[in-house]
Amino acid sequence: MTRVYIDRSRGMRRHWCGMESCGNKIKAAAYRARKKTASAVTAR
């Protein structure tokens, strides 16, 4: 299992984010960014 360290808390409390909880959000955002870039290139 892959985990990513994310610390966005006000008190700098550590929060570990696993693929099950928020990793999919990161992957989905990267996918949308790739699709947006690809569609912008093909639209030219």
Image (cartoon, grey):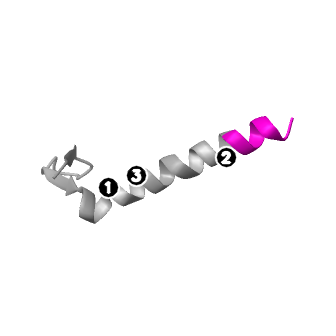
Residue ID for mark 3: 26
Looking at the image, which residue sits at the far bottom? 21
Say if 2 sits above or below 37 in the image.
below
Hey, what amino acid is under mark 1?
Answer: Gly
Q: Look at the image and give the residue range highlighted in magenta.
A: 38-44
Q: Where is residue 40 in the image (x, y as percent from the top left)?
A: 76, 40
User: Residue at the spot x=16%, y=53% of the render?
Assistant: 15
Q: Say whether residue 27 is left or right of residue 12.
A: right
Q: Say whether residue 24 is left or right of residue 19.
A: right
Residue ID for mark 2: 36
Q: Nearer the viewer, residue 25 or 6?
A: 25
| Mark 2 vs 1, N-terminal side | 1
Residue 41 magenta-highlighted: yes
User: Residue at the spot x=26%, y=64% of the render?
Assistant: 21
| Mark 3 vs 2, N-terminal side | 3
User: Is the magenta region chiefly helix, strand or loop?
Assistant: helix
- Density class for disc 1 (Cα within 10 Å; few <14, some 14-19, many ≥20) is some
Tell me the distance, in whole angstroms, between the alpha carbons under discs 2 and 1: 20 Å
Residue ID for mark 1: 23
User: Residue at the spot x=40%, y=52% of the render?
Assistant: 26
Instruction: Check whether the beta carbons of the residues at disc 3 and disc 1 lie within 8 A of each other.
Output: yes
